[in-house]
Image (cartoon, helix red, strand yellow):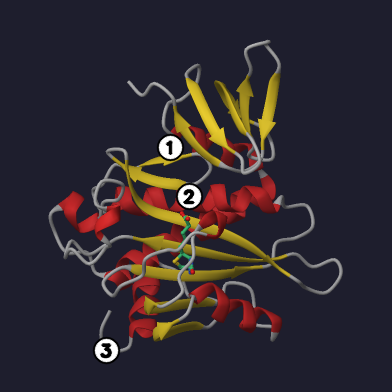
Amino acid sequence: MSGDPAAEVRAALRVAGLEWPAPIEFMAEVGSTSDVLRALAEADSPEWTVVLAGRQTAGRGRHGRRWASPPGHLYMSVLLRPGPSVRLSLIPLAAGVAVKEALTGNGVDARLKWPNDVLVGGRKVAGVLGEGVASEPGVQSLVLGVGVNVADDGSLPDELRELATTLDAERRAETPLAGLAAAVLVRLRAWYSVLAVAPGDVLAAWRQSALPWWGRMVEVDAGVERIAGLARGVDERGALLLELADGAVVPVLAGEARELRPR
Ligand code: BTN
């Protein structure tokens, strides 16, 4: 992003028919956009406040992993304050669908790997991290972080070469970051409003966008234990349902999943 990136994102949103209802901040370099946004959330920033960065020095991924964050890629965090009836655990799934659709809009067919890794050809192109924020009693607040690998310039660390890809490499063209940020935000607004009234529709959209694991052997590294079983679907919380060898079906709420015998 160049010039005034926040204004560019706002303008791209306007072109898409969306007058963004909250501040959009851009910082050339931050530790983590989600930490900056958390501080803004605690200072009562409104829902839909967005923080974008040119690079992060302490970007983080799920399970406390590092998220490599050199310049040229998208780093964005969005503040959500859902009503009490909204299940927080479904928001990252809705965000995964939003990112997948934004990539589709850029001509790239991505798939979601439970819960919300975004893959192209089996390699990760984007990730979503939802983190709760302490709020007043009765208020739920969530900082949603989205990272998309964009530039095809060799800037991602060597150790990710086999595991990750970039949007530009997949579409063989340069993607303007402001337009991509706006596309993600547009789809996120859409799915977030569906979530409030029809969470089942979000789960159905997630399933349609997901790797077709159903009926196949999947293993989840859930921290303290490793669970393997036939993937049967996701429940109303977004937990992965695995059928164990004894026929019992167990919900797995979080973890790192992989197909055991990919086809
Ligand atoms: C994952 O592990 O797949 C989630 C990655 C989330 C990365 C994004 S980049 C913007 C925001 N700031 C962070 O430090 N992390 C998230």
Q: Does any atom of ligand 1 lie closer than 8 Å to the CB of label 2?
A: no
Label annotation for residue 3 = 3
Taking the spot 60% from the left edge, 49% from the top edge, the residue there is 194
For the residues labelled 1 and 3, the Cα–Cα distance comes to 35 Å
For the residues labelled 1 and 2, the Cα–Cα distance comes to 9 Å
Taking the spot 68% from the left edge, 47% from the top edge, the residue there is 197
Report the side of 217 relative to 263 (left or right).
right
Q: Are marks 1 and 2 in contact (CB under 8 Å)?
A: yes
Q: Amino acid at mark 1?
A: Ser
Q: Which residue is mark 1?
A: 209
Quick one: 102 or 221, which is closer to the camera?
221
Q: Does any atom of ligand 1 lie closer than 8 Å to the CB of label 1?
A: no
For the residues labelled 3 and 2, the Cα–Cα distance comes to 29 Å
Report the side of 68 relative to 153 (left or right).
right
Q: Are marks 1 and 3 in contact (CB under 8 Å)?
A: no
Label 1 crowd (10 A; few <14 / some 14-19 / many >=20): some
Q: Is residue 53 above or below residue 256?
A: below
